[in-house]
Amino acid sequence: MMRRFFRAALTAFALASPSIASPSIAAQVREPRISLDSATSSAPHVADLPASAFRNANGSPRLRDDQYAFVRRRIVPLLEKWSRDDRLAIAPAYITALILKESGGDSLAVSYAPALGLAQLTANADSDMRLMVTEYHFQWMAPEVNRWPRAAAVRSPTATAAAIHSLLARGAVTSRTEFLFAPESSARAALFWVRLLENKWTTAFWPGGDGPAARAKLNGGRPLTQHQMFDLVTVSYNRGYIEVKALVDRYGADWVSHLSELTGGQAEAADYLERVRAYTTLLQAH
């Protein structure tokens, strides 16, 4: 049985004004997805820019030259390759932008959350991902996801950033024992997680489910615009889809104006969204 899906051009979120994504008929059963607009590029590439092109909101440099060079050399070619997988089809410029904002290219980064590694995923996000890939449409991800090594010490509910830094310094945890500290696996996990978050906001079935409500709240029941999808997926990656859902339910189309509620009145979430959009714009190859 055929079903409908829309192609949302993720890089266009940062570059164009919102527009309704055009539905098309799928040749086989498959779920909606974030994908590249075929009119933009059939073989997407990430623009090669100097590290100095990327700035924090206050204008200070975002990246160290050596860490950015590592991302360009080791990670970007993989993201470009993976974007051509029709099951994912997520713009490599977008994932690169997320990584640069999240960790600055530091594969051993640990945040206060604690979020870990290049893509700054948390143990909770990883647990969600392992559960979501048991669903039929995403079972193809499961063998790879379940094969990644996981260190119990960094996944304990009591693990702090300081404790994890100590484990890394002593060699008790390494990229061989925890996949989030392995750059390639961390980037791959970010790609999978973005794909699963997109599903959260576009479908009515688990592991999605928020699609109908999001369309009703944000766009009068019509398909979400490219701009709306960018905002939903990006802030969900940073703050969690449950918190984003609460804002959407409360404020509808004006939810982005209330991002400070996610960070105790601070501008962190709004800054994150703005920076990822700016970096995606810079990295979109022309």
Image (spheres, rainbow, N blue to C red):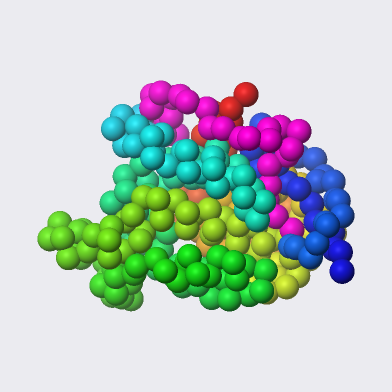
Q: Where on the picture, by quarter, is residue 244?
A: bottom right
Q: Is residue 88 above or below residue 47?
A: below
Predominant SS of the magenta segment: loop
Q: Quadrant of residue 166?
A: bottom left
- The answer to whether residue 251 of the structure is visible from this angle is no
Q: Is residue 58 magenta?
A: yes
Q: Position of residue 59 (x, y in %)?
A: 41, 28
Instruction: Please say whether residue 123 is visible from this viewpoint.
Output: yes
In the rendering, at what x and y percent does residue 83 appear? 59, 45
Above or below for 199 versus 152:
above
- For the magenta stretch, what is the residue range? 32-60
> Residue at image x 41%, y 55%?
185
Name the image quarter holding residue 215.
bottom right
Q: Residue at 59% of width from left, 66% of height from top? A: 140
Q: Would you place residue 251 above or below residue 149 in this image?
A: above
Q: How many marks?
A: 0
Q: Residue at x 27, y 65 (%)?
A: 177
The image position of residue 9, as x and y in percent, is 70, 42
- x, y percent for residue 35: 68, 47
The residue closer to the viewer here, 230 or 147, is 147
Question: Is the N terminus in the top left, top right, bottom left or bottom right quadrant?
Answer: bottom right
Tell which residue pokes out farthest to the left in this image.
170
Q: Residue at x 42, y 59 (%)?
A: 121
From the viewer's perspective, tell me whether residue 271 is left or right of residue 107: right
Position of 216 compared to 88: left or right?
right
Quadrant housing the C terminus: top right
